[in-house]
Image: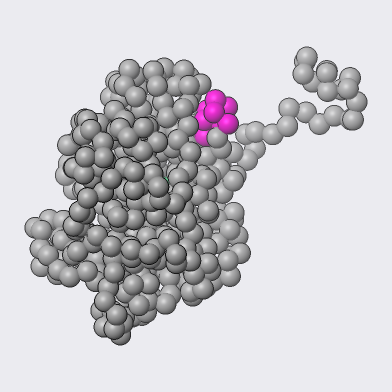
Amino acid sequence: MTAALSTTKRTLDLGPAVELVSKEEGHRQPLAPEFVCIEDFSPLEVAYDFGRVRREDIEAGPRSIWRYKKLLPVPSNVEEIPNTEPGCTRLVRADRLAKALGLKRVWVKDDTGNPTHSFKDRVVAVALAAAREFGFDTLACPSTGNLANAVAAAAARAGWQSVVLIPSSLERAKVLTTAVYDGNLIAVDGNYDDVNRLATELAAEHETWAFVNVNVRPYYSEGSKTLGFEVAEQLGWRLPEQIVVPIASGSQLTKVDKGFREFGQLGLVEPTPYKVFGAQATGCSPVSTAFRNGHDVVQPVKPDTIARSLAIGNPADGPYVLDTVTRTGGAIEDVSDEEIVEGIQLLARTEGIFTETAGGVTVATTKKLIETGKLDPEAETVLLITGDGLKTLDAVEGRIGPKATVPPSTDAVRAVLEG
Ligand SMILES: *Cc1c(COP(=O)(O)O)cnc(C)c1O
């Protein structure tokens, strides 16, 4: 898998990144497109030498995740290279949602505003930037939908080939919004875990393909830190007290925490305590189940939920999610498909934000965490809304629609509004 690397003669520029370190035993190795340590078989993570990073430098940077380039494994001139420039999405003060939930103060991080309308643009942009340095020429992934959109779009913008593998049962909207970028979109008869296994086999066979969430996963996953960075910067350079994060592979949750810790270590924020909460759909709740039973390993499940973007039955970062949530004093809960749809409708009704099913999971889980006394209603809480409702219209289909269909007459409209 290092062949792509050895064909590039120029020196590698991944900014502040210096090496890869294994998560379990801390074995070190040079930066390369590899994702698992051959000594302890645990995931590899990027290690850095940050030097000095000042708030003013970040504030003077571009209005995208590249303002944090000194904290990411990307080349120093990353903003000059064609990519999708995600990030700097809104952090919305959500007073009406807070009231409905019985919380004192709530912020919604609205990541529907990214180029392909989900947080996946963040991780893919970082993966593409790193993959280019390693000399790859094709961007690939197994996907539950949003990643497919983000990979196909980023590859199109960069002028790269893409190979995107999806379960054939995926929502129609997510198939069309990927196919439009005209890469190699392949539907596979099987669930996400089958597709993921296929991708791992293909990654071993194709040395010039960068599978964003497989062989370049250590770089990809760092992109999720930018959610944590942005929340802290947008709160006025401080950390929230509680944050609720949806879990698929679990990478995002652990990296939001990593982002908060790095900001604290670098003196960019006061390292105040915060709790990280995890949200899953009951139909795919392996991490929530392990948390409830006090286990430190995650038993794989076969997913069956409308929250397909979170339907990973064998989550790679499950054990690290349990560590993060336990260390920060948070909790994990799961909610039914019915509660997910109610969560989507609650956010839309109170804040005018239409989220996909994953956001419904976050909102509904927050409600449940309050009801079970695990979330402090007095503490400031941030909800991560990670994807757009237009991609999962089938979740609300048949439950919502016009109040009435009337002839073009003022009387008819008045009758409906008064009736
Ligand atoms: C992928 C995804 C997540 C979770 O990502 P992980 O890092 O795999 O846990 C959350 N929300 C949406 C909308 C996603 O597409």
Q: How far across and how far down the image is residue 297, in percent?
A: 18, 48
- Residue 357 in sight from this viewpoint: no
Within the magenta stretch, is there residue 359? no
> Residue 403 vs residue 171: left or right?
right
- Residue in front for this viewpoint, 218 or 176: 218
User: Left of 194 or right of it: where is 43?
Assistant: left
Q: Which residues are magenta?
A: 344-352
Residue 92: x and y in percent read 48, 32
Q: Measured along the vertical axis of the image, is residue 249 above or below residue 186? A: above
Question: Viewer-proximal residue, 7 or 249?
Answer: 7
Name of the residue lying farthest toward the top = 418
State the quadrant of the C terminus.
top right
Which residue does the image show at 48% across and 66% down from the upper left? 82
Find residue 310 and report its horizontal and vertical position in percent.
Answer: 40, 48
- 326 displayed left or right of 280: left
- Residue 188 placement, left or right of 235: right
Residue 370 sits above or below residue 10 on the image:
above
Residue 197 vs 362, above or below: the answer is below
The N terminus, quarter of image: bottom left
- Predominant secondary structure, magenta span: helix
Which residue appears at 36% of the width and 38% of the height? 233
Nearest the viewer among 310 and 49 is 49
